[in-house]
Amino acid sequence: MLLAAKRTTRIAAPATHLAGICILGFLTLLTSIPAAAATATTTFTVTATVQATCLVSATGLAFGTYTGAVASSTSTVSVTCTNTTPYNVGFSAGLATGATVTTRKMTGPASALLSYGLYSNAGYTTNWGLTIGTDTVAGTGNGSAQAITVYGQAAAGQYVAPGAYSDTITVTVTY
């Protein structure tokens, strides 16, 4: 029995093919080496100018049913001003004919008037008006809402026409 000999044939790669493989390997090696990076830096200024500002809001003041006896109630004015901003809170006379900051009046049926006062203290002795340094309330903003109580009182002995009475007060914050 004859056995056939197994023959292995090698094909030689062309020299240019081998050179290309070597170059690719070298390039791969170069790209994996970190390059020495150069940097440059600078700075810039960030600025802002904060303008003094204030916001104001208020709750209504309701005396309820007036029976001829003294009626008292409170309201809250909230003032929010930028930090360290000084302010003054003043109140208008209201809308009724003949009203002043010391003699405010609510208007009712047939233009009937019911007098009342607004005060900055619970004893109802410090009238709240519009003149800075005289009858306003001063404060300094802290960036948060600051609640200020308004004390209202309708004097006894006013026997006016029955019905609904109202007035509108303008709150002015001067800063």
Image: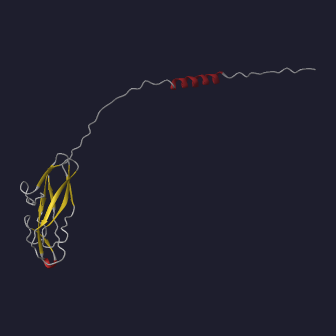
Residue found 55% across the figure and 25% down from its top: 28
113 left or right, relative to 40? left
Residue found 15% across the figure and 73% down from its top: 67
Q: Nearer the viewer, residue 124 or 17?
A: 124
63 left or right, relative to 39? left
Q: Nearer the viewer, residue 170 or 28?
A: 170
Quadrant where the N terminus is found in the figure = top right
Q: Nearer the viewer, residue 107 or 32?
A: 107
Q: Position of residue 132 (x, y in %)?
A: 8, 55
Residue, far left: 134
Q: Position of residue 41 (x, y in %)?
A: 33, 30
17 left or right, relative to 89? right
Residue found 67% across the figure and 23% down from its top: 14
Residue found 71% across the figure and 21% down from its top: 12
Picture quarter containing residue 24?
top right
Establish if 150 lies above or below 9. below
Is the image coloured rainbow, by chain, by secondary structure, or in one colour? secondary structure
Q: Is residue 123 visible?
A: yes
